[in-house]
Image: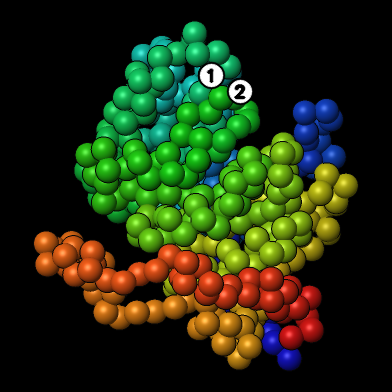
Amino acid sequence: MANFEPDPKLKFTFGLWTVGNIGRDPFGGPVRESISPVEVCNLLGEVGAYGVNFHDNDLVPIDASQAERDRIVRDFKKAMRVNGLVAPMATTNLFSEPVFRDGAFTSNNARIRAYAIQKTMRAMDLGAECGAKIYVFWGGREGTESDATKDPIESIKRFREAINFLCEYSLKQRYGYRFAFEAKPNEPRGHMYFAVTGSYLALIPTLDHPDMCGVNPEFAHETMAGLNFVHHVAQALELKKLFHVDLNDQEMGRYDQDFRFASVNFKSAFFLVKLLEDYGYNGPRHFDSHAYRQSNYADVKNFAAGSMRNYMILREKARRWNADKQIQSLLKQINVEDAGLSKLTKKFSPANAKKLLAEPLNYKKLAQAPLLYEKLDQLTNEVLLGIR
């Protein structure tokens, strides 16, 4: 019998804002009492999580005094120690306060842009104090409802300047941060800048310190726009830019639901887990999701445990898929190799081009190669449905 208990090596993490979510939505107020960061740590310790992440103001209220800040941080670090937790990632809330209603780093107001950078510097100090080495940037208000209101070229430049400044700050302070950018195609702005993971992958080479910058794709974000999340993660992995990943679930075309991981899209979740495991991703696996609004905190605990258990179950399914002789036999038939031709096409040279042009490649004959994809997909379903 497979063991589906959370494996510490997989670094399962939750945010203060996830298990601490109070169930508010645009149509109704809170349904759960607010719980403290210490209580969140206690809950995560009970379910066997690896770590806890936070926005600056999840942990320390925006108007807290220095004495209050120090006490909160001291209590939080003690709660992490007691519950065997670490804080791998931190981030800044640049979206909740009215000052950011038209963006933070891309605001039209230079003083607001400066405040956003100042707030992030202080949040980076806080994250480093708690041990974080990954710093996530989600541009929650970076966008427009009307393009009459912002110049998109200037907005890109402003965002780049802010990140370059903050990279230098991290280096100067010797924090050792790796920055991870999180894309979202829509919500809460009508039109979001850097809408998909590829948008940030294109931005990173233009930064002053591209080596310290990567991405933090979120399952719900690309899925809500009808895109294939696995493909976006694969691109980041192949480029060695997958610094962090947010796991949750989402129905296409809906608002940002942040459901428990693998609670809706079983097959997509399976291929995501398989990708991460097959290619040896060793960063945190963060559950950026929350329990149903109907849940009490006993059920929130079930939500957290279920998130990790679903990953472990799909990890075992991926092992079965990889070990299934019939599936592997089909893959060998489908993936037709030709060492001689691959050598020619691997790198251009005049000699290789001349040899390739001389090859008798018959398109009609090549089109007759069997592709038993229906059978392969059915066998995949049978693994997922538990009969293989």
Q: Quadrant of the C terminus?
A: bottom right
Q: Is residue 329 left or right of residue 92?
A: right
Residue at disc 1, secondary structure: strand
The residue furthest top is: 148
Classify 20 as above or below 316.
Answer: above
* 10 Å crowding of disc 1: few (<14), some (14-19), many (20+): some
Residue 115 x %, y %: 40, 22
Residue 15 x %, y %: 60, 51
Q: Nearer the viewer, residue 204 or 168?
A: 204
Q: Along the polypeptide, which appears first: circle 1 or circle 2?
A: 1
How many numbered discs sit on the rendered protein? Answer: 2
What residue is drawn where x is 79% and y is 41%?
Answer: 23
- Disc number for residue 190: 2
Q: Is residue 93 left or right of residue 324?
A: left
What residue is drawn where x is 84% and y is 30%?
Answer: 28
Q: Is residue 259 left or right of residue 225?
A: right
Amino acid carrying mark 1 in the image: Thr
Classify 69 as above or below 86.
Answer: above
Say which quarter of the image contains residue 204.
Answer: top left
What residue did someone put label 1 on? 144
Classify 306 as above or below 52.
Answer: below
* 10 Å crowding of disc 2: few (<14), some (14-19), many (20+): few
Q: Quadrant of the N terminus?
A: bottom right
Residue 52 x %, y %: 57, 57
Residue at disc 2, secondary structure: loop
Quick check: marks 1 and 2 in contact, CB under 8 Å?
A: yes
Amino acid carrying mark 2 in the image: Gly
